Amino acid sequence: MQHDAYRAMWERLDLDLPAHDGLLQVLGKFYGDIYMSQQGRLQGMEYLDFVLSEVHGLRIQELQDAKAQGRKVIGTFCVFVPEEITLAAGAIHVGLCSGAEAGTELAEQLVPRNTCALIKSFIGFKLAKLCPFTQSCDLVVGETTCDGKKKAYEAFAEHVPMLVLEVPQQKRACDRELWKAEVLRYKAEVEALTGQTITAQSLAAAIRTVNARRRVLQRLGALRAASPAPISGRDALLINQVSFYDDPERFTGAISTLCDQMEARVAAGEGVAPADTPRLLLSGCPMAVPNWKLPYVVESAGAVIVGEESCIGTRNTRDLVDESGTTVEEMIDAIVDRYLRIDCACFTPNSERMDNVVDLARAQKADGVLQYTLLFCQPYGHESMKLARRLEAEGIPNLAIETDYSMEDVEQLKTRVEAFVEMLRSRRG
Ligand code: SF4
Ligand code: SF4
Protein backbone atom coordinates (compact mmCIF):
# COMPACT_ATOMS: atom_id res chain seq x y z
CA MET A 1 0.00 0.00 0.00
CA GLN A 2 2.75 2.36 1.08
CA HIS A 3 4.82 1.20 -1.87
CA ASP A 4 1.95 2.14 -4.23
CA ALA A 5 1.84 5.60 -2.67
CA TYR A 6 5.58 5.97 -3.22
CA ARG A 7 5.24 4.86 -6.83
CA ALA A 8 2.57 7.47 -7.43
CA MET A 9 4.86 10.08 -5.84
CA TRP A 10 7.82 9.02 -8.00
CA GLU A 11 5.59 9.18 -11.07
CA ARG A 12 4.54 12.73 -10.15
CA LEU A 13 8.24 13.58 -9.83
CA ASP A 14 8.72 12.32 -13.38
CA LEU A 15 11.12 9.48 -12.50
CA ASP A 16 11.76 6.68 -14.97
CA LEU A 17 9.97 4.05 -12.87
CA PRO A 18 11.46 0.83 -14.36
CA ALA A 19 15.00 2.25 -14.23
CA HIS A 20 14.37 3.55 -10.72
CA ASP A 21 13.10 0.11 -9.59
CA GLY A 22 16.33 -1.36 -10.93
CA LEU A 23 18.41 1.22 -9.05
CA LEU A 24 16.65 0.52 -5.75
CA GLN A 25 17.17 -3.19 -6.23
CA VAL A 26 20.90 -2.81 -6.86
CA LEU A 27 21.25 -0.37 -3.98
CA GLY A 28 19.42 -2.72 -1.61
CA LYS A 29 21.67 -5.65 -2.53
CA PHE A 30 24.83 -3.53 -2.31
CA TYR A 31 23.78 -2.26 1.13
CA GLY A 32 22.98 -5.76 2.33
CA ASP A 33 26.38 -7.09 1.22
CA ILE A 34 28.41 -4.21 2.62
CA TYR A 35 26.48 -3.22 5.73
CA MET A 36 24.26 -5.98 7.00
CA SER A 37 27.11 -8.52 6.87
CA GLN A 38 29.05 -6.61 9.58
CA GLN A 39 29.45 -8.07 13.08
CA GLY A 40 29.09 -6.14 16.33
CA ARG A 41 27.25 -3.12 15.01
CA LEU A 42 25.92 -0.59 17.48
CA GLN A 43 22.19 -0.76 18.10
CA GLY A 44 21.89 2.89 17.10
CA MET A 45 22.81 1.96 13.53
CA GLU A 46 19.25 0.66 13.11
CA TYR A 47 18.22 4.30 12.69
CA LEU A 48 20.67 4.69 9.80
CA ASP A 49 19.50 1.41 8.23
CA PHE A 50 15.95 2.70 8.40
CA VAL A 51 16.79 6.14 6.99
CA LEU A 52 18.71 4.60 4.14
CA SER A 53 15.96 2.09 3.36
CA GLU A 54 13.56 5.05 3.11
CA VAL A 55 15.91 7.40 1.31
CA HIS A 56 13.69 7.59 -1.78
CA GLY A 57 10.49 6.91 0.18
CA LEU A 58 9.72 8.53 3.51
CA ARG A 59 12.31 11.33 3.22
CA ILE A 60 10.98 12.31 -0.21
CA GLN A 61 7.44 12.17 1.17
CA GLU A 62 8.55 14.56 3.92
CA LEU A 63 9.95 16.94 1.32
CA GLN A 64 6.72 16.81 -0.65
CA ASP A 65 4.66 17.47 2.50
CA ALA A 66 6.89 20.45 3.35
CA LYS A 67 6.52 21.78 -0.20
CA ALA A 68 2.75 21.44 0.05
CA GLN A 69 2.95 23.74 3.08
CA GLY A 70 4.87 26.31 1.05
CA ARG A 71 8.44 25.45 2.06
CA LYS A 72 11.18 25.34 -0.59
CA VAL A 73 13.81 22.66 -1.16
CA ILE A 74 17.36 23.66 -2.06
CA GLY A 75 19.85 21.09 -3.38
CA THR A 76 23.64 21.45 -3.18
CA PHE A 77 26.78 19.61 -4.26
CA CYS A 78 29.36 21.21 -2.02
CA VAL A 79 29.89 22.02 1.65
CA PHE A 80 30.55 25.62 0.68
CA VAL A 81 26.86 26.46 0.37
CA PRO A 82 25.91 27.98 3.75
CA GLU A 83 23.14 25.81 5.12
CA GLU A 84 22.50 28.28 7.95
CA ILE A 85 21.07 30.76 5.44
CA THR A 86 18.86 28.14 3.80
CA LEU A 87 17.40 27.10 7.15
CA ALA A 88 17.02 30.67 8.41
CA ALA A 89 14.71 31.37 5.45
CA GLY A 90 12.59 28.32 6.31
CA ALA A 91 13.82 26.22 3.37
CA ILE A 92 15.12 22.63 3.42
CA HIS A 93 18.76 22.03 2.50
CA VAL A 94 19.70 18.69 0.91
CA GLY A 95 22.98 17.36 -0.40
CA LEU A 96 22.50 15.82 -3.84
CA CYS A 97 24.54 12.71 -3.38
CA SER A 98 26.34 11.80 -6.66
CA GLY A 99 28.01 8.64 -5.34
CA ALA A 100 26.98 6.03 -7.92
CA GLU A 101 27.35 5.37 -11.62
CA ALA A 102 24.09 6.11 -13.43
CA GLY A 103 23.15 7.58 -16.76
CA THR A 104 26.83 7.80 -17.72
CA GLU A 105 26.22 7.72 -21.47
CA LEU A 106 23.72 10.55 -21.18
CA ALA A 107 26.08 12.53 -18.95
CA GLU A 108 28.87 12.14 -21.49
CA GLN A 109 26.71 14.02 -23.99
CA LEU A 110 26.96 17.06 -21.71
CA VAL A 111 30.46 16.79 -20.21
CA PRO A 112 33.71 15.30 -21.54
CA ARG A 113 34.44 11.64 -20.86
CA ASN A 114 37.48 12.51 -18.77
CA THR A 115 35.35 14.19 -16.11
CA CYS A 116 35.33 12.88 -12.53
CA ALA A 117 32.71 10.29 -11.55
CA LEU A 118 31.04 12.64 -9.06
CA ILE A 119 30.16 15.19 -11.73
CA LYS A 120 29.06 12.55 -14.23
CA SER A 121 26.93 11.02 -11.51
CA PHE A 122 24.87 14.13 -10.72
CA ILE A 123 24.30 14.82 -14.38
CA GLY A 124 23.57 11.17 -15.14
CA PHE A 125 21.06 10.85 -12.29
CA LYS A 126 19.17 13.88 -13.56
CA LEU A 127 19.17 12.97 -17.24
CA ALA A 128 18.23 9.34 -16.55
CA LYS A 129 15.39 10.56 -14.26
CA LEU A 130 16.57 8.60 -11.24
CA CYS A 131 16.91 11.10 -8.41
CA PRO A 132 13.75 12.15 -6.51
CA PHE A 133 15.83 14.67 -4.50
CA THR A 134 16.92 16.58 -7.61
CA GLN A 135 13.34 16.40 -8.89
CA SER A 136 12.09 17.90 -5.61
CA CYS A 137 14.42 20.90 -5.70
CA ASP A 138 13.11 24.41 -6.21
CA LEU A 139 16.69 25.57 -6.62
CA VAL A 140 20.03 23.82 -7.10
CA VAL A 141 23.10 25.71 -5.90
CA GLY A 142 26.46 25.12 -7.51
CA GLU A 143 29.83 26.73 -6.82
CA THR A 144 32.96 27.63 -8.74
CA THR A 145 35.23 25.25 -6.87
CA CYS A 146 36.92 23.06 -9.50
CA ASP A 147 36.88 23.64 -13.26
CA GLY A 148 35.04 20.36 -13.83
CA LYS A 149 32.12 21.43 -11.69
CA LYS A 150 31.84 25.01 -12.86
CA LYS A 151 31.74 24.07 -16.53
CA ALA A 152 29.34 21.19 -15.82
CA TYR A 153 26.94 23.60 -14.10
CA GLU A 154 26.67 25.62 -17.31
CA ALA A 155 25.26 22.54 -19.04
CA PHE A 156 23.27 21.43 -15.99
CA ALA A 157 21.52 24.81 -15.77
CA GLU A 158 19.55 23.88 -18.88
CA HIS A 159 17.92 21.08 -16.88
CA VAL A 160 17.40 22.48 -13.36
CA PRO A 161 16.84 25.93 -11.80
CA MET A 162 20.40 26.86 -10.82
CA LEU A 163 22.35 29.44 -8.93
CA VAL A 164 26.16 29.30 -8.98
CA LEU A 165 28.11 30.89 -6.11
CA GLU A 166 31.59 32.12 -6.76
CA VAL A 167 34.01 30.57 -4.29
CA PRO A 168 37.38 32.34 -4.23
CA GLN A 169 40.49 30.25 -4.76
CA GLN A 170 42.74 32.15 -2.37
CA LYS A 171 42.21 33.47 1.16
CA ARG A 172 43.38 37.09 1.07
CA ALA A 173 41.33 40.04 2.39
CA CYS A 174 40.00 40.74 -1.12
CA ASP A 175 38.91 37.08 -1.42
CA ARG A 176 37.03 37.35 1.84
CA GLU A 177 35.25 40.42 0.46
CA LEU A 178 34.27 38.52 -2.67
CA TRP A 179 33.02 35.57 -0.60
CA LYS A 180 31.03 37.85 1.70
CA ALA A 181 29.36 39.42 -1.34
CA GLU A 182 28.46 35.91 -2.56
CA VAL A 183 27.06 34.89 0.83
CA LEU A 184 24.91 38.05 0.81
CA ARG A 185 23.82 37.29 -2.75
CA TYR A 186 22.82 33.79 -1.64
CA LYS A 187 20.85 35.28 1.27
CA ALA A 188 18.99 37.63 -1.12
CA GLU A 189 18.22 34.79 -3.57
CA VAL A 190 16.94 32.50 -0.83
CA GLU A 191 14.81 35.26 0.66
CA ALA A 192 13.31 35.94 -2.78
CA LEU A 193 12.65 32.24 -3.33
CA THR A 194 11.00 31.64 0.03
CA GLY A 195 9.39 35.05 0.46
CA GLN A 196 10.85 35.13 4.00
CA THR A 197 13.21 37.74 5.38
CA ILE A 198 16.04 36.32 7.44
CA THR A 199 16.05 37.82 10.92
CA ALA A 200 18.64 37.79 13.70
CA GLN A 201 16.42 35.32 15.52
CA SER A 202 15.97 32.89 12.59
CA LEU A 203 19.66 33.06 11.66
CA ALA A 204 20.82 32.47 15.24
CA ALA A 205 18.52 29.44 15.48
CA ALA A 206 19.82 28.07 12.16
CA ILE A 207 23.44 28.54 13.27
CA ARG A 208 22.68 26.63 16.47
CA THR A 209 20.97 23.80 14.54
CA VAL A 210 23.84 23.29 12.10
CA ASN A 211 26.49 23.66 14.81
CA ALA A 212 24.69 21.07 16.94
CA ARG A 213 24.91 18.59 14.07
CA ARG A 214 28.59 19.41 13.60
CA ARG A 215 29.21 18.95 17.33
CA VAL A 216 27.60 15.52 17.45
CA LEU A 217 29.69 14.46 14.44
CA GLN A 218 32.79 15.84 16.18
CA ARG A 219 31.88 13.74 19.22
CA LEU A 220 31.53 10.68 17.00
CA GLY A 221 34.94 11.44 15.46
CA ALA A 222 36.62 11.84 18.85
CA LEU A 223 35.20 8.50 20.06
CA ARG A 224 36.80 6.80 17.06
CA ALA A 225 40.22 7.65 18.48
CA ALA A 226 39.66 4.88 21.05
CA SER A 227 41.34 1.54 20.69
CA PRO A 228 39.78 -0.87 19.90
CA ALA A 229 37.76 1.18 17.40
CA PRO A 230 34.14 1.35 18.64
CA ILE A 231 32.55 1.66 15.18
CA SER A 232 33.48 0.55 11.69
CA GLY A 233 34.59 3.08 9.08
CA ARG A 234 31.72 1.97 6.89
CA ASP A 235 29.14 2.84 9.54
CA ALA A 236 30.81 6.15 10.38
CA LEU A 237 30.90 7.08 6.69
CA LEU A 238 27.21 6.22 6.34
CA ILE A 239 26.40 8.51 9.29
CA ASN A 240 28.26 11.37 7.61
CA GLN A 241 26.54 10.67 4.29
CA VAL A 242 23.07 10.61 5.86
CA SER A 243 23.80 13.94 7.60
CA PHE A 244 23.47 15.60 4.19
CA TYR A 245 19.83 14.78 3.61
CA ASP A 246 18.18 13.85 6.91
CA ASP A 247 16.27 16.36 8.99
CA PRO A 248 19.10 18.05 10.97
CA GLU A 249 17.46 18.04 14.42
CA ARG A 250 16.23 14.47 14.19
CA PHE A 251 19.63 13.35 12.93
CA THR A 252 21.48 15.10 15.76
CA GLY A 253 19.26 13.41 18.34
CA ALA A 254 19.73 9.94 16.81
CA ILE A 255 23.52 10.28 16.54
CA SER A 256 23.74 11.61 20.07
CA THR A 257 22.07 8.39 21.29
CA LEU A 258 24.46 6.35 19.15
CA CYS A 259 27.42 8.24 20.66
CA ASP A 260 26.15 7.34 24.15
CA GLN A 261 26.29 3.68 23.07
CA MET A 262 29.77 4.21 21.69
CA GLU A 263 30.91 5.78 24.94
CA ALA A 264 29.67 2.77 26.90
CA ARG A 265 31.49 0.52 24.48
CA VAL A 266 34.73 2.47 24.84
CA ALA A 267 34.40 2.43 28.64
CA ALA A 268 34.01 -1.36 28.52
CA GLY A 269 37.10 -1.65 26.30
CA GLU A 270 35.03 -3.22 23.51
CA GLY A 271 35.19 -2.54 19.78
CA VAL A 272 34.32 -3.72 16.28
CA ALA A 273 37.78 -5.17 15.66
CA PRO A 274 40.62 -6.38 17.92
CA ALA A 275 42.88 -3.68 19.37
CA ASP A 276 45.82 -4.75 17.20
CA THR A 277 43.89 -4.13 13.94
CA PRO A 278 45.72 -1.65 11.67
CA ARG A 279 43.98 1.73 11.77
CA LEU A 280 43.62 3.86 8.66
CA LEU A 281 42.64 7.45 7.97
CA LEU A 282 40.91 8.05 4.63
CA SER A 283 41.82 11.37 3.00
CA GLY A 284 40.83 13.18 -0.17
CA CYS A 285 37.75 13.45 -2.39
CA PRO A 286 34.28 13.22 -0.87
CA MET A 287 32.60 9.80 -0.78
CA ALA A 288 28.94 10.56 -1.45
CA VAL A 289 26.26 7.96 -0.77
CA PRO A 290 26.31 5.12 -1.97
CA ASN A 291 30.06 5.21 -2.62
CA TRP A 292 31.18 2.50 -0.18
CA LYS A 293 33.60 0.67 -2.46
CA LEU A 294 36.93 1.62 -0.92
CA PRO A 295 35.86 1.41 2.76
CA TYR A 296 34.53 -2.07 2.04
CA VAL A 297 37.78 -3.12 0.38
CA VAL A 298 39.82 -1.67 3.29
CA GLU A 299 37.82 -3.25 6.06
CA SER A 300 37.60 -6.59 4.24
CA ALA A 301 41.41 -6.48 4.10
CA GLY A 302 41.56 -6.58 7.91
CA ALA A 303 42.00 -2.87 8.70
CA VAL A 304 39.63 -0.45 10.38
CA ILE A 305 38.98 3.13 9.21
CA VAL A 306 39.15 5.62 12.08
CA GLY A 307 38.50 8.91 10.27
CA GLU A 308 37.62 10.59 6.98
CA GLU A 309 39.50 13.74 6.04
CA SER A 310 36.97 14.70 3.41
CA CYS A 311 33.88 16.79 2.84
CA ILE A 312 31.83 13.76 3.85
CA GLY A 313 33.83 13.82 7.07
CA THR A 314 35.95 16.26 9.05
CA ARG A 315 36.18 18.98 6.39
CA ASN A 316 32.47 19.49 6.91
CA THR A 317 32.40 19.17 10.69
CA ARG A 318 35.71 20.50 12.04
CA ASP A 319 34.80 24.21 12.22
CA LEU A 320 31.78 25.76 13.90
CA VAL A 321 30.17 29.11 13.16
CA ASP A 322 30.87 31.50 16.04
CA GLU A 323 27.60 31.83 18.00
CA SER A 324 28.30 35.12 19.75
CA GLY A 325 26.89 37.45 17.05
CA THR A 326 23.65 39.24 17.88
CA THR A 327 22.86 41.04 14.62
CA VAL A 328 22.36 39.59 11.13
CA GLU A 329 25.50 41.46 10.01
CA GLU A 330 27.64 39.90 12.77
CA MET A 331 26.28 36.45 12.06
CA ILE A 332 26.92 36.80 8.33
CA ASP A 333 30.54 37.70 9.14
CA ALA A 334 30.82 34.63 11.36
CA ILE A 335 29.42 32.46 8.53
CA VAL A 336 31.81 34.00 5.98
CA ASP A 337 34.80 33.32 8.24
CA ARG A 338 33.78 29.77 9.09
CA TYR A 339 33.28 28.75 5.46
CA LEU A 340 36.56 30.31 4.40
CA ARG A 341 38.34 27.94 6.79
CA ILE A 342 37.36 24.99 4.54
CA ASP A 343 40.60 23.49 3.24
CA CYS A 344 39.33 22.24 -0.12
CA ALA A 345 42.01 21.37 -2.67
CA CYS A 346 40.57 24.05 -4.98
CA PHE A 347 42.46 26.66 -2.88
CA THR A 348 45.98 27.77 -3.66
CA PRO A 349 48.09 27.61 -1.64
CA ASN A 350 46.40 25.12 0.67
CA SER A 351 49.09 24.19 3.14
CA GLU A 352 46.65 24.11 6.06
CA ARG A 353 45.18 20.93 4.63
CA MET A 354 48.55 19.20 4.93
CA ASP A 355 48.72 20.20 8.61
CA ASN A 356 45.12 19.14 9.19
CA VAL A 357 45.70 15.67 7.74
CA VAL A 358 48.79 15.10 9.90
CA ASP A 359 46.98 16.36 13.02
CA LEU A 360 43.97 14.17 12.33
CA ALA A 361 46.09 11.07 11.66
CA ARG A 362 47.81 11.62 15.02
CA ALA A 363 44.58 12.39 16.89
CA GLN A 364 42.92 9.22 15.57
CA LYS A 365 46.07 7.15 16.24
CA ALA A 366 46.08 6.06 12.61
CA ASP A 367 48.83 3.70 11.49
CA GLY A 368 48.62 5.05 7.96
CA VAL A 369 46.72 7.29 5.55
CA LEU A 370 44.88 6.05 2.52
CA GLN A 371 44.59 8.84 -0.01
CA TYR A 372 41.53 8.59 -2.19
CA THR A 373 41.37 10.57 -5.43
CA LEU A 374 38.67 10.28 -8.04
CA LEU A 375 40.04 9.71 -11.52
CA PHE A 376 40.32 13.00 -13.44
CA CYS A 377 40.15 15.11 -10.25
CA GLN A 378 42.93 17.63 -10.78
CA PRO A 379 42.82 19.45 -7.41
CA TYR A 380 43.05 16.34 -5.22
CA GLY A 381 45.35 14.57 -7.70
CA HIS A 382 47.89 17.38 -7.33
CA GLU A 383 47.54 17.56 -3.56
CA SER A 384 47.91 13.81 -3.28
CA MET A 385 51.52 14.10 -4.46
CA LYS A 386 52.23 16.95 -2.07
CA LEU A 387 50.53 15.18 0.82
CA ALA A 388 52.48 11.97 0.16
CA ARG A 389 55.74 13.90 0.58
CA ARG A 390 54.51 15.55 3.77
CA LEU A 391 53.32 12.27 5.29
CA GLU A 392 56.60 10.64 4.42
CA ALA A 393 58.46 13.43 6.18
CA GLU A 394 56.24 12.92 9.23
CA GLY A 395 56.90 9.17 9.23
CA ILE A 396 53.26 8.32 8.46
CA PRO A 397 52.86 5.58 5.82
CA ASN A 398 50.47 6.42 3.01
CA LEU A 399 48.96 4.77 -0.01
CA ALA A 400 47.49 6.85 -2.85
CA ILE A 401 44.56 5.31 -4.71
CA GLU A 402 42.92 6.70 -7.84
CA THR A 403 39.61 5.16 -8.73
CA ASP A 404 36.02 5.84 -9.81
CA TYR A 405 32.61 4.31 -9.10
CA SER A 406 32.93 1.24 -11.31
CA MET A 407 33.60 -2.20 -9.86
CA GLU A 408 36.12 -3.13 -12.52
CA ASP A 409 39.18 -2.34 -10.42
CA VAL A 410 38.03 -3.96 -7.17
CA GLU A 411 40.43 -6.92 -7.42
CA GLN A 412 43.34 -4.63 -8.19
CA LEU A 413 42.41 -2.35 -5.28
CA LYS A 414 42.18 -5.34 -2.97
CA THR A 415 45.71 -6.43 -3.86
CA ARG A 416 47.18 -2.98 -3.22
CA VAL A 417 45.22 -2.36 -0.03
CA GLU A 418 46.00 -5.81 1.39
CA ALA A 419 49.74 -5.29 0.80
CA PHE A 420 49.54 -1.87 2.52
CA VAL A 421 47.62 -3.28 5.50
CA GLU A 422 50.12 -6.13 5.79
CA MET A 423 52.98 -3.63 5.85
CA LEU A 424 51.23 -1.66 8.61
CA ARG A 425 50.65 -4.84 10.57
CA SER A 426 54.32 -5.81 10.43
CA ARG A 427 55.31 -2.24 11.42
CA ARG A 428 53.05 -2.55 14.46
CA GLY A 429 54.43 -5.96 15.32
S1 SF4 B 1 35.97 18.78 -2.08
FE1 SF4 B 1 35.83 21.01 -2.43
S2 SF4 B 1 34.43 21.16 -4.16
FE2 SF4 B 1 34.15 19.11 -3.31
S3 SF4 B 1 32.46 19.29 -1.81
FE3 SF4 B 1 34.37 19.62 -0.74
S4 SF4 B 1 34.67 21.87 -0.67
FE4 SF4 B 1 33.19 21.39 -2.31
S1 SF4 C 1 36.11 15.21 -7.07
FE1 SF4 C 1 37.57 16.75 -7.82
S2 SF4 C 1 37.06 17.02 -10.00
FE2 SF4 C 1 35.32 15.98 -9.02
S3 SF4 C 1 33.95 17.62 -8.41
FE3 SF4 C 1 35.28 17.25 -6.64
S4 SF4 C 1 37.02 18.68 -6.81
FE4 SF4 C 1 35.95 18.58 -8.83
Image (tube, grey):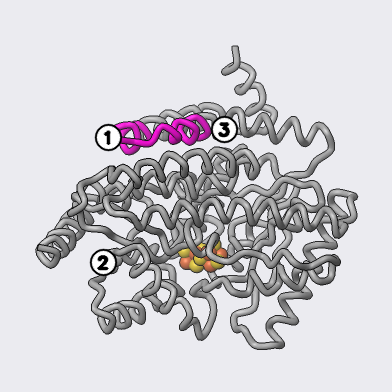
What amino acid is labelled 1 in the image?
Gln
Q: Is residue 105 visible?
A: no
Seen in the picture, residue 18 relative to 302 is either above or below; the reply is above
Q: For the residue with label 3, is its CB less than 8 Å from the closest atom of ligand 1?
A: no
Quadrant of the snapshot with the N terminus: top right
The circle drawn on residue 39 is 1
Q: Residue furthest front?
A: 267
Q: Are marks 1 and 2 in contact (CB under 8 Å)?
A: no
Q: Quadrant of ligand 1?
A: bottom right
What amino acid is labelled 2 in the image?
Gly
Horizontally, residue 183 falls left or right of residue 134, namely right
- Disc 3 marks which residue? 56
Horizontally, residue 154 falls left or right of residue 409, namely right
Horizontally, residue 388 falls left or right of residue 195, namely left
**Residue 117 x/y as whole percent:** 44, 57
- Disc 2 marks which residue? 368
